Amino acid sequence: MTQNKLTDLNNHLFAELERLGDEGLTGDELAKEINRADAISNIASNVVENANLALKAAIAYDKREGADMRLPGMLETTQDSDSK
């Protein structure tokens, strides 16, 4: 399974920006590209929001200061799961 990174998302966003900048797009083609850009933007926002949540969870986990804090399963890393 491919593990996408935020740099991949950044590349997709810039590729879409380049497609939108194509002055040859008109009418229906332009409308389709705008709809596609909206969809990409919505998904990108969700990806960034999810990454931000994961970062906040990692920071909170690192600051636990000896407390026996367990992350919810969906937030555990492979390393955390292996140590149980």
Image: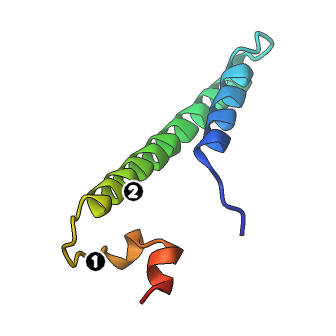
Residue at point 39% right, 51% down?
55
In the image, taking residue 73 as reference, residue 81 lies left or right, namely: right
The one nearer the camera, 11 or 37, is 11
Residue at point 53% right, 34% down?
38
The C terminus, quarter of image: bottom left
Tell me where residue 28 appears, x and y as whole percent. Answer: 70, 25
Tell me where residue 63 appears, x and y as whole percent. Answer: 25, 58
Residue at point 73% right, 26% down?
29
Callout 1, which amino acid? Arg
How packed mark 1 is, by other alpha carbons closer than 10 Å (few <14, some 14-19, many 20 or more), is few
Instruction: From this view, report whether residue 56 is shown above or below residue 71.
Output: above
The one nearer the camera, 30 or 56, is 56
Residue labelled with disc 2: 54
Instruction: From this view, report whether residue 72 is shown above or below residue 27.
Output: below
Residue labelled with disc 1: 70
Tell me where residue 56 appears, x and y as whole percent. Answer: 32, 52
Q: Which residue lies furthest to the bottom in this view?
A: 84
In the image, taking residue 45 as reference, residue 7 lies left or right, namely: right
Tell me where residue 13 appears, x and y as whole percent. Answer: 63, 32
